[in-house]
């Protein structure tokens, strides 16, 4: 019985295995280097004229507070938010990013005064200069009529299109252009004088040139056209033909005869038939003579053949040349 009791005690007092604990990893301690960029930004001195982007942290009925990640907050008064009369301060929300220009380093209460509309203005003029350099074509709506021209807005900036720059043709009534949509290029950008001048005529002229070049490229050497003598010079005649194209008939290409003056055979308004003899670098060369030479060689009539014997035919030279003009 004693042995059984001891055995039972050993069974009862036997300990269950203990689960191993997962090793604890220590997170690296934060150092000043982790905040170096933030600290440097917070101590950066902002000055008037700087354009900076921050995050809106407060919006009231009269102003917007902006976190500039600097030594103090920025404040944008409502009258410095936008030039657009339709603008509402309620359209801005906490957390929105906003870009503004510093207009006062300290408003007396430890805040930096900012202006979003001046930043928009500066960025817009920079963008307008880039558009002019790139010859950008803009689609604009005519928003107003002024003396000697019309008004259209680009990037919020008031632009002027002179009447002489509205179209390739004469503009008689500017009121007919109000609310019309036009394509225009910027031809003058002057931020200091707040002067922006545009031209719709330049775009229309470029389109006309491109259209004309496309028509010229379709003309092939050897093509024959009916045309009209448009202008006579000492060295030849300019002839207009299909699709309002124009080409030069040099004096040497007018007639098979030697001419001292173009006026000997042509006058302005004459209808002529011309053949294309060259098309290079956008210039078409024409010839009247090339077609005359063909017309002057007539077909050889059958009667010039002299049948001597059956199955043989001979041709007298004189008879052969009788109807041929040399």
Image (cartoon, rainbow, N blue to C red):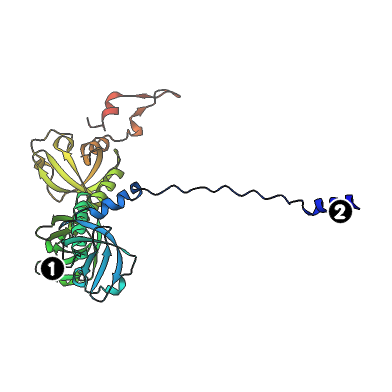
Location of the C terminus by quadrant is top left
Which residue lies under the disc numbered 1? 172
Q: Which quarter of the picture shows residue 97? A: bottom left
Q: Is residue 49 visible?
A: yes
The residue lying toward the viewer, choosing from 58 and 187, is 58
- Residue 145: image location, x then y, percent: 14, 71
- Residue 122: image location, x then y, percent: 18, 58
The residue lying toward the viewer, choosing from 301 and 1, is 1
Residue occupying the far front of the picture? 2
Query: Under tag 1, what secondary structure?
Result: loop
Instruction: State the separation of the CA atoms marked 1 and 2.
Output: 126 Å
The residue lying toward the viewer, choosing from 217 and 100, is 100
| Front of the two marks 1 and 2 | 2
Q: Which mark is residue 6?
A: none
Total count of labels: 2
Q: Which quarter of the picture shows residue 113? A: bottom left
Asked whether, in this view, residue 58 is left or right of residue 154, the answer is right
- Residue 202: image location, x then y, percent: 18, 55
Which residue lies under the disc numbered 2? 5
- Say which label, 1 or 2, has the lower sequence index: 2
Query: Under tag 2, what secondary structure?
Result: helix
Label 1 Cα neighbours within 10 Å, binned few <14 / some 14-19 / many ≥20: few
Q: Residue at x 30, y 65 (%)?
A: 56
């Amino acid at each position: 019985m004693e042995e059984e009791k001891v055995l039972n005690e050993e069974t009862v007092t036997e300990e269950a295995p203990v689960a191993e604990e997962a090793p604890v990893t220590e997170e690296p301690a934060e150092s000043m280097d982790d905040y170096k960029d933030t600290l440097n930004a917070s101590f950066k001195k902002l000055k008037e004229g700087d354009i900076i982007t921050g995050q809106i942290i407060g919006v009231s009925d009269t102003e917007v507070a902006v976190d500039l990640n600097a030594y103090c907050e920025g404040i944008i008064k409502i009258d410095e938010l936008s030039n657009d009369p339709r603008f509402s301060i309620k359209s801005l929300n906490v957390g929105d990013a906003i870009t503004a220009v510093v207009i006062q380093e300290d408003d007396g209460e430890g805040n930096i005064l900012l202006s979003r509309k001046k930043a928009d203005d500066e960025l817009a003029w920079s963008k307008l200069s880039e558009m002019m350099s790139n010859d950008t074509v803009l689609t604009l709506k005519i928003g107003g009529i002024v003396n000697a021209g019309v008004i259209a807005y680009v990037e919020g900036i008031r632009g002027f299109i002179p009447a002489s720059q509205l179209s390739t043709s004469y503009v008689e009534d500017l009121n007919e252009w109000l609310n019309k949509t036009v394509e225009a290029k910027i031809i003058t950008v002057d931020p200091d004088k707040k002067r922006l001048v545009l031209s719709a005529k330049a775009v229309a002229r470029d389109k006309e040139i491109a259209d004309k070049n496309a028509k010229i490229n379709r003309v092939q050497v050897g093509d024959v056209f009916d045309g009209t003598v448009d202008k006579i010079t000492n060295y030849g005649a300019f002839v207009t033909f299909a699709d309002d194209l124009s080409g030069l008939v040099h004096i040497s290409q007018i007639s098979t005869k030697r001419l001292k003056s173009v006026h000997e055979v042509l006058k302005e308004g004459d209808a002529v038939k011309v053949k294309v003899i060259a098309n290079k670098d956008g210039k078409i060369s024409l010839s009247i003579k090339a077609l005359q030479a063909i017309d002057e060689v007539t077909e050889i009539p059958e009667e010039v053949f002299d049948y001597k014997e059956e199955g043989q035919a001979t041709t007298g030279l004189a008879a052969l040349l009788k109807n041929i003009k040399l």
